[in-house]
Image (cartoon, rainbow, N blue to C red):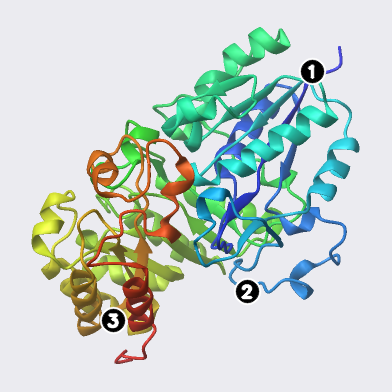
Amino acid sequence: MKPKSILLINPWIYDFAAYDFWIKPLGLLTLAAILRKNGFQVTVIDCLNPWHDPSKTSSPIGALKRTAFGTGEFPKTHIPKPEFFSSFPRKFSRYGISIPTFREMLRGLPPPDLVLIGSMMTYWYPGAFEAIRQVKDVFPGIPVVLGGHYVTLCRDHAAFSGADILIEGIGESALPSLCRNILGAEMTFLPSLKDYDTYPYPAFDLLPHNDQIPILTSRGCPFDCTYCASRILNPFFVRRDPYRVVEEIEFWYKQYGIVNFSFYDDALLIRPTEMFIPMAEELIRRKLPCRFHCPNGLHLREVTENVARLLYCAGFQTIRFGFETSDRERQRATGGKVKNSELETALAYLKEAGYRDRDIGVYLLCGLPNQDAEEVRRSIDYVFACGGRPVIAEYSPIPGTALWSEAVAVSPFPLSEEPLYHNNTLLPCRNEKLDYDMYRSLKMLTRQDRWKG
């Protein structure tokens, strides 16, 4: 019997700005790997992957600016702004391959038996809606399932997507019933949600090109910060065996020549003797010529002299840390993840290990409910004084988080009615003490050359 075919789609980004800072549809590719292991014929279209687009050269690096670290520009098309943003002074774009290219790719496939579409940011939902429209036009009558973060966080709004089925929460939990009810097939393999080592490697080989690969050593986070949705998206914290993580890195390096790896973890450094220290020591022992990047933000509290040395010696070239603010009261109110003294200690160890000031990115949240520009400015000055590089992370209100109600109460936008207003570019919780012009001035402050080394 011919195996059932399933098409998985990572949709476009619709936004004022977007840049490929190690973005890959890791969740979708994990589902693809599970489905393939169960004997299904699986195809993946990543609308953000420029190598899908035949209008580009065989290597789009010539057409799009890409870096040796696996980051770079997305293809983009300027499109009319949604009416909600008519007065906002920024252009709006669709990032990713062109719609004609997408339709051409769909028409080049035999009709699938099922289509799964992922979603990431709540305010990127127009890309998912567009993908659903195009799929239904090319493949009428084929069941379309929408899942991912947007559906989990904005279930009622996602009902307007046009999808036939909505999946909230961890996607693999829904696979057995989908396969049984829609495809009439039983899954013989399903990984354990409590044992992350039972998962197959994500199906990166189904993409046309990979200049970097993301790695997860864990799911979830033991912290419960008021602005973060990690506990909603992954209710429990589970970890892999550190040696199996290294085996995966070595697999992608030896089989596909990948040298850039990005860690998507929320808690890579937490309890370092369990994960990071043995993993880093094994990476050093195997002498893999790889570069590692941590765009999600590491925990400063766990940076000891030994951890800093291992970060440097194992090849962690892009290091970012979550600090959020130097205001002690707000630190306590948002979850107590880190103290000022811990930033000072961590940065001293990192510089002793060999990192320069400008190498150590420190995230600062800007635009929190009732936050003023002066607090952000003090935090910027403090990070510079400690010898780090301040990186502003604009706050995006997330439904279900502890800060959500306060954000809804203070925002000038109807956050609970329209997810587009969650877009951090807008500064959704702006106020008279932190408006858009003040924010732009703060961004300029972070770009000053005030590093010591």
Q: Which residue is tagged 3?
A: 351
Classify 10 Å Cα crowding around label 2: few (below 14), some (14-19), many (20 and above).
few
Residue 187 as seen in the image, left or right of residue 399: right
In front of the other: 91 or 170: 91
Q: CA distance from mark 3 to mark 1?
A: 59 Å
Q: CA distance from mark 2 to mark 3?
A: 25 Å
In front of the other: 49 or 220: 49
Q: Which residue is tagged 1?
A: 141
Query: Which is in the foreground here, disc 3 or disc 1?
Result: 1
Closer to the N terminus: mark 3 or mark 1? 1
Residue drawn at 27 percent across, 58 percent down:
299
Kind of residue sitting beneath label 1: Gly
Q: Which residue is tagged 2?
A: 67
Residue 412 as seen in the image, left or right of residue 410: right
Residue drawn at 50 percent across, 31 percent down:
151
Q: Is there CB contact under 8 Å for labels 3 and 1?
A: no
